[in-house]
Image (tube, rainbow, N blue to C red):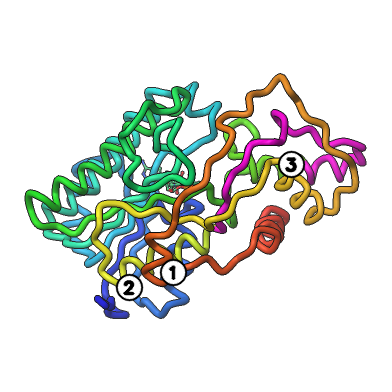
Amino acid sequence: MDAIAKNASILVAGARGMVGSALVRRLQAGGYTRVLAPLRQELDLMDQAAVHGYLQGHTPGYIFIAAAKVGGIQANNTYRADFIYQNLTIQNNLIHGAHLAGIQRLMFLGSSCIYPKQAPQPIKEEYLLTGVLEPTNEPYAIAKIAGIKMCEAYNAQYGRQYTSAMPTNLYGPNDNYDLANSHVLPALIRKAHEAQLRGDAELEVWGSGAPRREFLYVDDLADACIFLMERGFDGPLINIGTGADVTIRELAETVMRVVGFPGRIVYDHTKPDGTSRKLMDSSQINRLGWKPAVALEDGVGRAYRDFLGR
Ligand SMILES: NC(=O)c1ccc[n+]([C@@H]2O[C@H](COP(=O)([O-])OP(=O)(O)OC[C@H]3O[C@@H](n4cnc5c(N)ncnc54)[C@H](OP(=O)(O)O)[C@@H]3O)[C@@H](O)[C@H]2O)c1
């Protein structure tokens, strides 16, 4: 076990985001006293000189890269140039800058949605780059894959210990509830809440409700990332999921119970279902001794309370 000193300096890039804020919460709760969490106004991660200057000035011992341009299908498909350019630039600035500043340990955040579209289920780490990507988010996926390969290359050439975490679909505090570019779970929370306020009889759900998806509460993800960093994990990439999936119908029913919306679900069959099943194989991290703590209904309840508090 490669424990991290409680007074080690730890940089969380993207600290205001859903994942970054969960990492900061979990680090502070774990007694870490020197968590660096610059916001965009203090450090624009698109600015190479500023990022390199920051890293050389602060020389954190550990970096978590939770900064990225993130969105749902619609945003990924519409802003294709922004997704590839901004993600490549942010990660290039941080990964190369970390190397130049002599920083040995870094964790990059990948995603389950960058595995091949037709990957066998459950998805194992070794399936990366074995098939064609989902076309709607290809620019985002290519940038993320470049980040993973960049970490591997700095490890091979310079002996760094840069690793990549591959989370499944996440949800929780500080999620994006804007229907124009949100993911399915926060979108359902918002739609069910608004349907309840209006006294609607029905909740509209995109597609058939049959696809199966996996959802991880973001504080569990933060716990897994810190668990891996504390244990000195330096493999190239590792999946982080719950190991269990639900149908979109079951998800919508869970959200409706939590929100207290008594209506019925209607399915909009004009909207696409996407892949029929997406489940990660998280046996590698399970074998290391980590498992999630928050069950779906409990997590949706916590997320809904966060939504109400906005
Ligand atoms: N959400 C999911 O379901 C999910 C699933 C798998 C993997 N991931 C991965 O987890 C990571 C974090 O995702 P998230 O859901 O936490 O996204 P998020 O809530 O959108 O957070 C992203 C953060 O990056 C920051 N950022 C973006 N561009 C920046 C810039 N130029 N300078 C400074 N900061 C910048 C944003 O700052 P502002 O707050 O100022 O905009 C925001 O705080 C991403 O790599 C994503 O691919 C997410």
At label 1, the amino acid type is: Trp
Report x, y in % for residue 150. 20, 43
Is 19 inside the magenta-drawn segment? no
> Mark 2 = which residue?
34
> Dot 2: what SS?
strand
> Mark 3 = which residue?
249
Crowd rating for badge 3 (residues with CA inside 10 Å; few <14, some 14–19, many 20+)? some
Report which quarter residue 231 is drawn in. bottom left
Disc 1 to disc 3, C-alpha distance: 29 Å
Crowd rating for badge 2 (residues with CA inside 10 Å; few <14, some 14–19, many 20+)? some
> Dot 1: what SS?
loop
CB contact under 8 Å: marks 2 and 3:
no
Is 215 inside the magenta-drawn segment? yes
Report x, y in % for residue 216. 55, 55
Disc 2 to disc 3, C-alpha distance: 43 Å
Sequence-first tag of 1 and 2: 2
Which residue occupies 32% across, 33% down? Answer: 130
User: Which mark is in front, 1 or 2?
Assistant: 1
Which residue occupies 31% across, 61% down? Answer: 11
Ligand 1 has an atom within 8 Å of the beta carbon of the residue at disc 1? no
Report x, y in % for residue 40. 39, 47
Which residue occupies 64% across, 63% down? Answer: 295
In the rendered structure, find residue 290 and report the number of the disc placed on it. Answer: 1
**Magenta-tinted stretch:** 192-217
Residue placed furthest toward the front: 120
Sequence-first tag of 1 and 3: 3
Judge from the rendering whether residue 282 lies leftward or rightward of residue 178; answer left or right. left
Which residue occupies 60% across, 66% down? Answer: 294
